[in-house]
Image: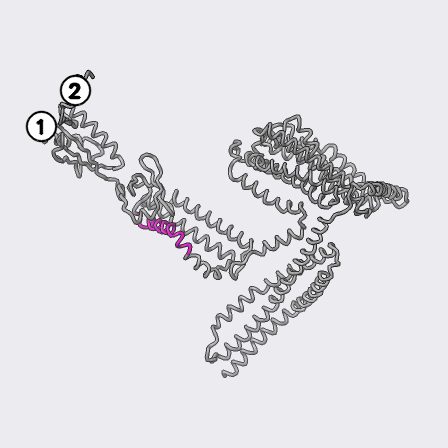
Amino acid sequence: MIKMRHIWTSLLIVTCLAMASMSNAQTTAENRLTHQRWLETADRAERAIDTGRASNAALEDLRTEIVDFRDLFTLTSKQNAARILTLQSQIDALGPVPENGSESPDIAVLRENITERMNDSRVPVVIAQEAHNRASGLIGEIDTIIRKRQTKQLLERGPSPLNPQYWPVAGRDLLGTGSSLFNETVLIAESRLGREHALNNFAKVALLAVMGLLLLFLGRHWAERLGDFMRRYGGRGTGVWSFLVSVLRVVLPYFGLVALIQAIVVTGLTGLRGTLLLEAVPLWCAIMMSFVWLSDRLYNKRDEDALLPVSTEYRSEARLYVRLLAIMLIAHDAIALFEKVENISAGSRAVVEFPVILLTSVILLRLRRIAQKERIAHSDKMSSAAKRAGLSMISPIISRVGAIVGIVAPILAAIGYGAAAEALIYPTVLSLALFSLILILNKFVRDVYDWLLRADSSAQDSLFPALVGFVIALMSLPFLALIWGARVTDMTELWDRFMSGFAIGDSRVSPTDFLTFVVVFIAGYTATRMLQKTLKNNLLPKTSLDPGGQVAVTSGIGYVGIFLAALIAVSVAGLDLSSLAIVAGALSVGIGFGLQNIVSNFVSGVILLIERPISEGDWIEVSGHMGYVRNISVRSTRIETFDRFDVIVPNADLVSGTVTNYTRGNTVGRVIVPVGVAYGTDTRWIEGILLEIANANPMVLSNPGPSVAFQGFGASSLDFEIRAVLRDVNWMLSVKSDINHEIAKRFAAEGIEIPFEQRDLWLRNPETLAGKPGDNT
């Protein structure tokens, strides 16, 4: 019977494995085919790297293929993770293999099959990890080759544009390009097919042309009308709508130009050169209109809208220079297109590019001169938005860098380093434009914040606009890197590495995991604070707990809630902190020595909340300081003295030191008022008067009643003390003052003398004070 059971168990396991194998057979075949294609691509990449003859474009295409494979391997390495964990948990549930080998045959068969399935599940993961590492290595080698080539091209010296032998060739190349473009267009326009194509698309061309003309000539007016309409709903004078209107004044005409260009393309009358030229025109229009918009925002005609401190007489000139920089960028891109279409020589390229570099340098130097002159004359008139953005500090640096580039770039281009000059001056112009855009967006965010909160200008210095400005600056860093020659593939590679996370021990923490942890923890923290607020304002005041107990309950729930929020956040984010146990244990020893005082104060704070020897509102005296307890935090306790000063006392001093609590449990306390009368006064009479005065005060308790003690014989008076128990010891000073007033009044009425201290002075040798014989002084 036992043997039959073993057979049935084995058959069941084999059947399950067979069904699983059939379901995964197709997937396995696809994985093998993908892996085979990967091996072919990897071998091809290694051959291209070894020979070093592949062009940059070919290497970029090859790199794109490898990146796609690597992404696939990343997904594959994670597919069987859940299954492997399940199988591992099954093996753990079976327990360890007995040392003597006497394991039940059923369990042995089950363990063997589960182990085999887990090994089979690990095979694709191991292969994917190996392929992923190989792909990352190949990508790194390709990037290194491309960077070396770019560096070599940048530092390579070419022909000088000042060499006269290149000038005629450059002129012929330019005239030849213009002539070829004109002849190509005329040839197509005169052909029958060209005319038929244009006539067939006449309706589409007309529609695009009408739309383009309307947006081009009426777009700015429409933007102004829309701004006037939106101002009816608020925000007038905040700068929000003026910003949006300024954007629409540029965007609408731009779309009009794009529509007109598309209309020309649809006619089909442009040849290859004309098509390439028209494809670049939208970008050139975008550059031009963007710089027009930047110039209007930076050097606005209205003083309150101008972001840079330039006087009115120089603003028009500054706006002109900014727009000329856009023309220089367009000219540079047109020259690159000219080189691509006509395949001109390096000498012609240097001759044509040099005037553009020279003019750009002159414009930068002139802008530097205006900025320097105006900064000295109007340093106190810089807009508040510019000052908050830090422009007062970075503006001189940016201006100085622009001036240096404006001097160095033409010199480099003149001696033949045209590539280095281009890589220096044009990114500088684009970087200045990017910094200007950041400044404008910062001002817009502050204006929106001011408008939404209905706040005055001082509210713009709050934290939220500053944080948004920091985020904008942070988001601009990738664009700044691209401007200065970084490849898009470099940025994506950095992003992939960032998203893959960082290793902590044997575990890996990705930004997604960290973001999940932060979101869950913030949600738990917010829920804890809301619960504390509800308990403090609604529930606990209706209970019999005293205010100190209510504070203790609220604080305790806060600590527990924060701890649970952190625990749940770690669990939801899936962070495996087991590998950090040893490291955390080692660090805890060193941190324990360094932070032992802080830990001691924290534990003391918890003890204060649990035992409650003091509570908020108590009148205490500790370490020579007397006052009311205003707040008990984790590390320290804040005491407000009678002089209205705050004294921060570490919690450890309150637990380990001596603390006098005058109001713990109840506010009943005793006051002592000393009184002195002259010698010869009837002491019993004085005692009766003082008792009457004490009993007459409404704050003095009748049970136990006040008492008068004859303390003794002083140096100049008979000393008495009134000892009375008050209903509220917090009124001690007021009661003492009232009793003293009443004593002075009664003693004056009864003719009782309050003596003052007297001293008799005896001179031992009074004759020394007399003058000597013959001394007139």
Residue 68 location, quadrant = bottom right
Residue 328 location, x and y as percent?
73, 38
Asked whether, in this view, residue 84 is left or right of residue 549, the answer is right
Q: Nearer the viewer, mark 2 or mark 1?
A: 2
Q: Could you say which is closer to the camera, residue 589 or residue 254?
A: 589
| The C terminus lies in quadrant | top left
Image location (x, y in percent) of residue 731:
26, 34
Is 458 placed left or right of 769 in the picture?
Answer: right
* Rendering quarter of residue 120: bottom right
Residue at coordinates 31% horizontally, 39% vertically from top-left? 628
Closer to the camera in the image, 480 or 475: 480
Q: What numbered label is drawn on residue 772?
A: 2
Give, as a single range, the part of the protein colored magenta.
Answer: 590-612
- Taking the magenta stretch, the answer to whether it contains residue 591 is yes
Q: Which mark is residue 680?
A: 1
| Residue 762 seen in render | no
Residue at image position (52%, 68%) is 88
